[in-house]
Amino acid sequence: MAKLALSLPKRGRWQVAEQSQGIPVARPQATTSSFWTAVWSIVWKDLRIEQHTRQTLSVMLMFSLVVVVMFNFALSTDLDAARQVSTGLLWATIILAGTLGLNRSLSIERENQTIDALLIAPVDRRGIYLAKVISVTIFTLLLEVALVFIFTIFFNKPFWQPAALLVLFLGTIGYVAAGVLVTSMTIQTRSREVLLPILLLPIVLPLILPAAIATAEIVSLQPQMDTVNSSISLIAAYDLAILAVGFFSYPFLVES
Amino acid sequence: MNMTRLNRTVAVLNVLAFLSLLVSIGFIFLYAPVERSMGNVQRIFYFHVGTAWVGSIAFFVALVAGILYLWRPQRRWDTIALSSVEVGLVFLTVTTAAGSVWGKPAWNTWWEWSPRLTLITIAWLVYAAYFMLRGAIEDEEKRGRFAAVYVIVSFVSIILAYVSIRIWRDIHPVVFGGTLESAQGAEQGLQDIAPGLASMRMGITLTVNVVSFSLIYVAWLMNRIRLQLLKDQVTTLKMRVAARLQGG
């Protein structure tokens, strides 16, 4: 901690010295605030791209619809069975559609080689990770808004309850945090999209299991709050742990 | 470590591991008493716990090697991590197979999706995917880096899963320091067997098995590391031959 406090003003001085040689530019110094400026500008860029192309979200949504319809078809002989498994189905749909969103959001940078520009930019690379997590989380949350609506209608269960939404929110953060990390690896390999599900899904299972259990409990007729609470703390622990691992190990994945 | 010394170490370890396995089998069948409620089938317990123990140690070693690789990218850390995951996966498979054989008479089923068995499945999938990741990357340095990051992420994920299964009640008994879970299980009548440590002789047999499986782990790890070094040598030699042919 002491080391950090010492290194920050040093960095600031270095920047000032550099600027005083040329024309003084109003640039934020390399401090916490500039870190977040970078993060938000990357998030903003991703949202703008999505606003213009509408590719990620529409693909995720269409895919989810196909999955829901397919499962409905598979379970149509037994409507009660379909209701029973609907929470598991909700999470399965989210993680499967999520892999599409992750692949899309990270490969778009590779296709246009904008990732190189991001890496050259004087931005902390951990900031790139955080920005990607935030933007993909936003996409996935938007997808979940639609899914909650669809599932409530199709399966007649109260998925819109605040507790269920909280579980969805927390679960999405952990899922995307692990997802951005793993996708950053897989898009740099030979097999690319094929590799992502087999690497990512087992890693997020410890998150999805309590999330699905908690969701099922919340939408059931007599929810047991013990189970819900312990599941939510497990999900939160997963979020924090994976975010921390991702935050510190992401720079190793984009070295060039 | 130079190759001749490594060869000698590996040879000694192989003999030691083989002898310790004989000793532990002797302990299991000749020394350990017959368990009261389950009979002879309980003797699987010693192999089951011994291999499970080594499995967790192996993945922990891989985690440490992964962290060291990111800190100081040297080839040997990557080799150790790879070897340890490979050996660990074998032990995990043996644990599952032994547990399944035991589960049939004890629970009247080969497999049960209980939290702990689900955890083992997840762990198996996670570490099997490790080899998929390695196989998909050609560049050696990049492969080491990615594999190291992956090993860290997967260990964290498995630890969290381990914490979570301790909360839910389970058909599977707890051997090492599980008070909460086993108490809950006993309350629900899930565990009529306190797994075998009631007798002193059983405790000694278990200890012997854990030690001997640890020895086998070390022996296999060294064998695997030696294999990797030989592989690297072959690659270097091939490259030199190719260079010579092109040059001449």
Image (cartoon, grey):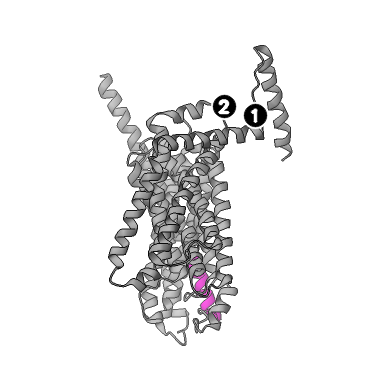
- At a point 46% along the width and 45% down the height, the residue shown is A139
Residue occupied by mark 1: A30
Q: Disc 2 to disc 1, how far (Cα)?
A: 9 Å
Identified by mark 2, the residue type is Pro
Marks 2 and 1: CB-CB under 8 Å? yes
Q: Is residue A25 left or right of residue B83?
A: right
SS label for mark 2: loop
The answer to whether residue B194 is seen in the rendering is yes
Left or right for B241, reference B172: left
Q: Main secondary structure of the magenta part?
A: helix
Amino acid carrying mark 1 in the image: Ala
Q: Nearer the viewer, residue B103 or B53?
A: B103
Image spot of residue B146 (x, y percent): 45, 41
Assess whether residue A16 is covered by the magenta stretch: no
Q: Which residue is mark 2?
A: A122
> Which chain letter goes with mark 2?
A
- Magenta stretch encompasses residue B207: yes
Chain at tag 1: A
Indicate the quadrant where residue A112 lies: top left
Camera-side residue of A124 and A88: A88
Is the residue A165 above or below the residue B230 in the image?
below
Left or right of A212: which side holds A8? Answer: right
Magenta residues, start to end: B197-212
Q: Position of residue A120 (x, y in %)?
A: 51, 26
Counting residues from the N terminus, which is met first, the one under dot 2 or under dot 1? 1
- Residue with the most extreme top position: A22
Q: Is residue B121 visible?
A: no
**Residue drawn at the location 50% of the way across and 29% of the way down:** A119
